[in-house]
Image (cartoon, rainbow, N blue to C red):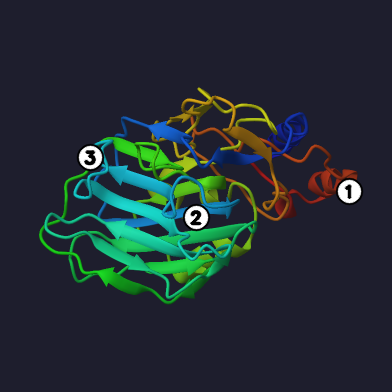
Amino acid sequence: MRNKRILTFLLLLNLISFPAFGGVDFDGLDDSVRISNTSGAIDGMTDMTISCWFNVDQQGDSAFPRLMRKARTAVPDGDNSYWELHLNLKSGAGTGILQFRAGYVTTVGIWNTDDAIFNFDEWNHFLVVYTHDNVNNNPTFYLNGDSITVNETSTPGGPTLTDTSFMRLGDWGTRTRSLDGLMTEVAVWDTRLTASEAALLGKSKIKGMPYQIQPGNLVGYWSLDEVANDVSANNVTFVDRSGSGNDGIGDDGDNNTGMLGKAEEVLSYDFSPIIVTRDAGVAPPVGAPQVIMITKIIQFIMNPISAVAII
């Protein structure tokens, strides 16, 4: 026990050396994170939960920017997207609607919130729970941990689409549905998270929280915090911290200036009330507070149960 406490204490000290990187700032023109050859449980999910934090700066090249898209090919021709998480900014009033699409052979299913439900220049957590095997199924939306009303605007029809190997963050694949804003803590589970788990993700504001929620079903997790503030994210590898191996590559498009790392603004790297468990070979969260209060280190030494333990 003493050796484990010492090891964990040293890990805490090691964390001090990392700056508190936060997420990626997409320029709304041609930026994305390319995950071009996905494999494993993230492909063809039936039960699924999709989650991320986002902050819209303004409308970019489209009023319908994609947060995430999982599909068969890079060409978004309307009939090959397995699922999409995106926004509707067409009001032009600095507000937006949340939307989710699920691919079926005859007609794509589309669901969205009633009206403008979030504001620009504010951090929000968006989570969708869905079972992708029946046209009669409807998704559940959570905004900042609370369940919200969802409307079906396109009734799905036909068999479920097949899904293979293509994913994008911040765009849908052809640089025409680009997010102008920030995103961090992108996570995917191949199970339906509960309302209490969705609330924990949306309300805790703790960096690395996806590690705590059904880790055995976490099939994709991109913290997007590999890049320091205002440093280019072009060609940077964004690690899939679920251990599934589906790393992404930052793609700044043609301008090579607009896709930047951003310091953390909304989430805390303070893991003091949480026990973090992870399997061998899965990377721990990148980044930590630049300053850790000496009182917390003393708390760990005196009472490790209430402090962080990385096992």
Asked whether the beta carbons under mark 1 and mark 2 sit within 8 Å of each other, the answer is no
Residue under label 3: 72
Q: Amino acid at mark 1?
A: Thr
Secondary structure beneath dot 2 equals loop
- Quarter of the image containing the N terminus? top right
Front residue of 64 and 245? 64
Identify the residue at image location x=52%, y=66%: 143
Q: Residue at x 23, y 50 (%)?
A: 78
Q: Alpha carbon of mark 1 to alpha carbon of mark 2: how far? A: 28 Å
Q: Is residue 258 above or below residue 146?
A: above
Q: CA distance from mark 3 to mark 1?
A: 51 Å
Residue that carries the numbered disc 2 in the rendered image = 213
Question: How many residues crowd around disc 3 within 10 Å: few (fewer than 14), some, or many (20 or more)?
Answer: some
Please identify the quarter of the rendering in which residue 160 is found. Answer: bottom left
Foreground mark, 3 or 1?
3
Task: Give me the disc on residue 295.
Answer: 1
